[in-house]
Image (tube, rainbow, N blue to C red):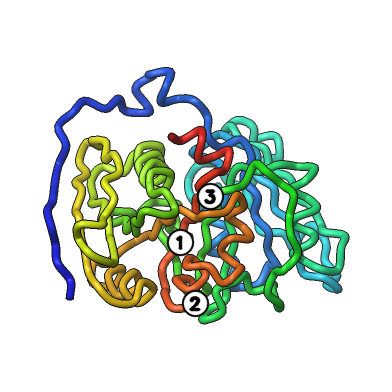
Amino acid sequence: MLTTLRTTNPQSSIPNPMSGNPDQLVPILEHVLHPSDFSEGSQAAFHHALKAALVAQSRLTILHVSPGTKLSWIDFPGVRETLERWGLLPPDSPRTALPQLGIEVRRVVARLKNPVKSVISYLKTHPADFIVLASRAHEGRASWLRQSVAEPISRQSGQSTLFLPEGVTGFVSAEDGSLSLEKILIPVAAKPRPQPAVAAAVRLVRRLQCPRGTFVLLHVGEAGDAPQPRCPAVPGWTWKHVTRTGDVTHGIVDTAGKQSADLIVMSTSGKNGFLDALRGSQSEQVLRNGRYPLLTVPERSLAARKLT
C-alpha cells in the first residue's frame, strides 16, 4: 500500500551554487569517464556524459571498450558536432574551440580484451569522479558486459555512476542539450546511509539550475523505521515523503512509475559505484526491472565525502 506522509518546502536559506558562495563552488567533478561500445544504445549515455562535463567544467574521457572491433577516430561520438547542434559552438568549429567551453575531451581505446578489466585498469591510473554508461535492458549491466563481475577491486576512492537503460532518452535532450529533470526519486533506508544520495540529488539540481521540481524520498518498510536525512531547501523544489510496504525492488520501480520519475538516486554500501551496481545489489535489481536513469552514490566514496 502506498502512503504519502507529507510534502514539505523548507524555507531555510540555502545559497545557490551559482551565487559565488565558495562552499557551493567547490568542484565535485574533475573527470567524467564514459565507457562505451559506440552502439546506438550508448548515444543517450554519451549526451549525459557530455552535459555533465560541460556543467562541471571538467575533463571528459570517452573510453572505447568493445574488444575485437576495428575503429578509427571518426567512429568516436562527435563531440563538436553535438555541441554545434546544441548551439554552444558555431558550425565547423576547430578542435581549439572546446577549451573555450571549459572542457577537455580525451578519446581512448581500451587495450585489454575484457572490457570490465579495461575500465578498472584505466581508473587505477586515471581516477574519475563520475562514470556514465548505458545499461542493457532487463540485464542491469552495461551492454558490453557479458558476464557478472566477481573479481575484487582495490580502488578506495569510488565513483558515482549514472546508468542510462538502452532505449531511455533520459533527462538530457539529444537535439539541443536542454534538460527535463523535475522529479527525482530517492529510496532511503537505515543502511546504506541515505545522506550521500540526498546530497548528490540536491547538488545535481543546483548545478543544472533546474528551476522547479520535487524530490521524492521513498522508504519501503514500516513508517517508524524510515530514516530522516537532512533535506536542504532548494528554491522551486519541494520534498515529498512516501512509505510503502512489500518488496523493495518492486516498490522502487512501481513508485518511480507512479511518480513519473526522471531519475532515481541511490546510495550504495560499497566504495565503488561502478561495480556495486553490477554485483546483484539492490541497485542492479532496479536496473534490471526499471526503465529509469539511475545514479548510484557509494556511501564511503571520496565523492560522497565531498558532498556531505
Q: Which residue is mark 3?
A: 298
Q: Which residue is mark 2?
A: 288
User: Dot 3: what SS?
Assistant: strand
Give coordinates of residue 294: x percent, y percent. Answer: 46, 61
Q: Nearer the viewer, residue 68 or 99?
A: 68
**Residue positioned most to the bottom:** 138
Indicate which disc, 2 or 1, sits on the residue closer to the N terminus: 2
Is residue 81 at all visible to an observer of this figure?
no
Question: What kind of residue is marked 1?
Answer: Leu
User: Dot 1: what SS?
Assistant: strand
Indicate which disc, 2 or 3, sits on the residue closer to the N terminus: 2
Question: What kind of residue is marked 2?
Answer: Arg
Question: What kind of residue is marked 3?
Answer: Pro
Front label number (1 vs 3): 3
How far separated are the C-alphas under marks 1 and 3? 13 Å
Mark 1, Cα crowd under 10 Å, few <14 / some 14-19 / many 20+, is: many
- Image vertical order of residue 257 relative to residue 277, above or below: below
Q: Nearer the viewer, residue 140 or 245?
A: 245
- Image vertical order of residue 50 relative to residue 293, above or below: above
Q: Which residue is mark 1?
A: 294
Q: Residue at x 82, y 57 (%)?
A: 109
Give coordinates of residue 22: x percent, y percent. Answer: 43, 18
Q: Quick check: 237 left or right of 252?
A: left
- Image vertical order of residue 225 relative to residue 304, above or below: below
Q: Decide: marks 2, 3 in contact (CB < 8 A)?
A: no
Q: Residue at x 64, y 32 (%)?
A: 99
Q: Residue at x 22, y 36 (%)?
A: 235
Q: Residue at x 40, y 37 (%)?
A: 207
Q: Quadrant of the N terminus?
A: bottom left
Q: Quadrant of residue 184?
A: bottom left
Q: Decide: marks 2, 1 in contact (CB < 8 A)?
A: no
